[in-house]
Image (cartoon, helix red, strand yellow):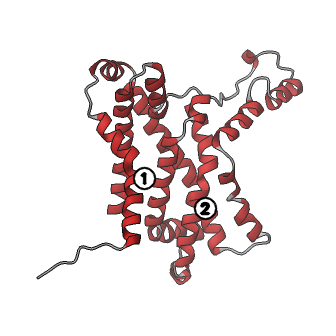
Amino acid sequence: MRFNFSLSKWQLIAYATGFCLSLPLLFLIFESFQPDTEVFEHLKQTVLWDYTYNTVVLIFGVCLLSSIIALPLAWLCAYSDFPGKKHFEWALMLPLAMPTYIIAYVYTDLFDYAGPVQSWLRAVFGWQSPDDYWFFDIRTLGGAMVMIALVLYPYLFLIFKTALKEQSYKLVQASQVMGYSPVKSFFKVSIPLGRGAIAAALALISMETMADFATVNYFAVSTLTTAVYDTWLGYYSLTAAAKISGISLRYLAWLLLINCCG
């Protein structure tokens, strides 16, 4: 029996394109296996675990906040009819057009001590210094979570809304006939049926969050992404930076594996 392994011209172009696109990843994997004991071991013994902790907490917080924002809004747009619904749907997608660090700059200027919000509060209540009142500090890990979630939640909104529209609304109606309230139907029927779409969207949000550099750097939050930048340009160690990037790649591969298995 003979097997024909000949490839057409377009298949060769596709394979060549895929190989060229994967070259940076292949080089990164190759570089991460090179010996570099001094810089990487120093980071491992000092700050690397803090960077990893901040990254994991940041991703978890962004995914949680994105779910709180996007899931109810997607359910509302998919199963409800109200005035201005079409405008409401596309308006909820607008944050994707705004870079995350621009949102961070705007909100920082608004809520900083010298910003208009705190200045107005001091003028109204007669406060003279920060000791007279408490106000949240936006340039923290929690603030970075909120800023990134405000930009990335449309991914989950769009994917979950599409998944709901492809489902049969009769299932929701049947649950309500059985005595489920709209809220209980949302948690007991819509969420389980759309868990595949939710997992895919959260995996995408996680990757975008891990890749973000400008926002976390502006907020002085140390993550694996900032560690790669600092190690490469601060310690001049490409190998150590590649090893840190390998940690991020393994985490992303784990996320994708969970998504595929789910």
Question: 10 Å neighbourhood of mark 1: few (<14), some, or many (≥20)?
Answer: few
| Viewport quadrant of the N terminus | bottom left
Q: On the picture, is 90 further left or further right than 54?
A: right
User: Residue 253 has which mark?
Assistant: none
At horizontal 34% and vertical 19% (from top left) the residue drawn is 39
- Residue 251 seen in the figure: no
Residue sitting farthest toward the left: 1
- Closer to the N terminus: mark 1 or mark 2? 1
Q: Secondary structure at mark 1?
A: helix
At horizontal 74% and vertical 64% (from top left) the residue drawn is 88
Question: What is the x, y in percent for residue 11?
Answer: 37, 70
Residue hosting label 2: 72
Q: Nearer the viewer, residue 188 or 208?
A: 208
- Which residue type does callout 1 highlight? Leu
Q: Quadrant of residue 145?
A: top right
User: Is 113 situated above or below 160?
Assistant: above
- Which residue type does callout 2 highlight? Pro
Question: What is the x, y in percent for residue 184?
Answer: 53, 67
Residue hosting label 1: 21
Q: Secondary structure at mark 2?
A: helix
Q: On the picture, is 134 further left or further right than 7?
A: right
User: Is 2 situated above or below 137?
Assistant: below
Question: 10 Å neighbourhood of mark 2: few (<14), some, or many (≥20)?
Answer: some
| Badge count | 2
Q: Nearer the viewer, residue 132 or 4?
A: 4
Question: What is the x, y in percent for residue 240?
Answer: 35, 27
